[in-house]
Every structure is written in structure tokens, then in C-alpha cells.
Image: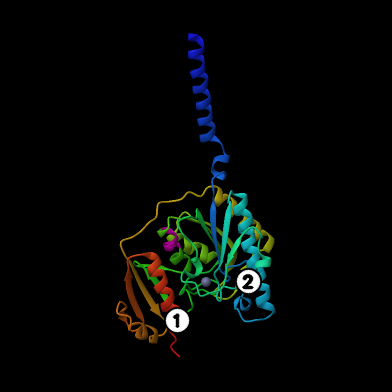
Amino acid sequence: MPTTFTLLPMRSLRLALSALVALTLSPDTASSQARKVYISVDMEGISGVNGDNQTSAAGAEYGRARKLMAEDANAAIRGAFEGGATEVVVNDSHGSQRNILPEDLDPRVRLISHSFKRHGMMEGLDSTFDAVIFVGYHAKAGSPRGVFAHTGSGVLRDLQINGLSVGEGGMNAFLARWYGVPVILVTGDDVAVEEQKVTVPTVRGVVVKRAINSRAVELRPLADARRDIQDAAKAAVATARKAPPERLARYTVRMAMRDPTIPEVAAAFREIRLVDATTMEFTRESMPDAYRLIRVLYRFINTD
Ligand SMILES: [Zn+2]
């Protein structure tokens, strides 16, 4: 039966080829992959947050702010799932890191809450994630404009990693890159979004408010801002591509402080070098190590 012998393999080959073409061209291919998305949520850059309501003191203003925080997070979560996320983890990243009430949050996600966390705003991130989103971020310390511009606890004048001045978004991007997880979206005021592009040139940004200076702000309508966050998260997750981990040989961290007492105390650690009266420097061989020490230095030295 020579005809059967020739026909069957030909048909099998055609089937295999069409399956291969379908696999390559199908728009569903990307979204059918597991997409684990990490969302770090700060408060100063949340839509509608305009000042005193971002402190963790009890009160009606704070109560409003934590609801607003959950709403922007939920917009990003909805978008992430629409873009193909199969798993989303949210990390509460502001102040006490216990701002978002779990009952206010999209029921599909897990919430990392409260401090102390060794990796702070990035606690729980590892190389199993496919993408990182920053929600509610703000400008770095020393920015002349930017709603409540600061870095970390507010004791820093400037933070540099390998000579590059960074804020919280920049420092967190260095850590994400160590794990090979791309930062795909940042939301916040216009200054925060611009600053993020220094460390992540490809990042999408959603500007939810315009900083007039470091306090005054022009807020966008809440519904518009949240719709833009959702749309951007959807597009960013749908097109996210993991990168190989970027692990530099060393991370040299320079911290310029407002108060000279902090470097003076910190110099008790043998590896801390004093650059001048208010500036200290150290070197670590991994970004997670460097990250942990930065947090200890800006959080736990009490100079009272
Ligand atoms: Zn912050």
C-alpha cells in the first residue's frame, strides 16, 4: 500500500506544521502562560491623596487615604488579570505597611502586610515572578517638585547606587533586576513617573496627579486615573517579557543624610565608610544584601 504510506506522513506533517503555526501566531499564546505579578503599593502617589491624609495617624483623613490606596491597587489588579495574570501578590509598602484593609482589596490576590520586612517595599519578590508594578509611588528625596518627595524614612538627602541617584522606585528596580523580573508599570505624580524612567527606561507610567511643588497638587478625576491604571496594567502585563537576572559584581551604596549623627553612629559597623560629615558609603556583592543594609541604616538608627 505505497499510497497510504506516502499520504499518512504527509498529512501528519501538515497537521504538525499547522499546529506549529497556530502556536506561533495565536494571540492567546502569551496569556496562556502563567503570569505571576507583584504589586508594590505606596501611598503618596495614590490618586486623590493630597497631603495630611497620607500619615498613618488615626483619623478620618487617614481612613480615606487607605481606601483610596486600595482603589488604585484594585485598578492595577483588575488590569493585571485582564492582561493575563494568573496570580497577583500585593505588598503594602507605605509607612507602617499595614494600610490596606484586606476586605477592601480584590479577593483574588494575596496581601503582604505590616513591618518589619527585611525587603520592605519589595518583600516576597523572587525570580518566580514575571512582572513588577509600582502603584502610588512618589519623587525621591531632594526633588524640588514632587508630592511629599522623600526616600525611605525621610532621613536621607540622597541615595546613590553605583553612582546613580535613586529614589524608592529606583532602589526597588535594582532589586527587581537582580531577580530578572521587569518593572512594567509605575503610577504616581508626574515627577515620580519621570524619575522611574531613569532606572527603567521602558517602564509604562500613569500620571494620576501633577505636582505643583512638594505639597500642592492638581488631582485628576479619580475615575479617569483608575481607568488609566487598569488599562495600562492590562497592556503592560500582556506584553511583559522576563529578562535574565542582572547581577553586578558589586553594589556601592552612598547615603547622604540630613543629620550627621546617623553616619557617626553607623560608622560603628566596620564596613561603613564616612565620605564626609553627613555621607556614608558601603559595598555589598548582592543587591538583596545591599537593600537590607540600606533599610537598617535609614530606619533603625535612633539619634535622639
Ligand atoms: Zn514611599
Location of mark 2 (residue): 49
Q: What SS does tag 2 mark?
A: loop
Q: Which residue is mark 1?
A: 300
Please give the range of residues in magenta: 173-177
Q: Residue at image x 62%, y 54%?
A: 79
In front of the other: label 2 or label 1?
Answer: 1
The CB of the residue at mark 1 lies under 8 Å from ligand 1: no
Is residue 33 visible in the rendered image? The answer is yes
Does residue 231 appear anywhere in the picture? no
What is the CA distance from the residue labelled 2 to the residue labelled 1? 27 Å
> Residue 214: which quarter of the image?
bottom right
Taking 215 as reference, is 304 left or right? left
Amino acid type at image mark 2: Val
Mark 2 closeness class: few <14, some 14–19, many ≥20 residues within 10 Å: many
Looking at the image, which residue is at 39% across and 73% down?
Answer: 293
Who is closer to the viewer here, 3 or 148?
3
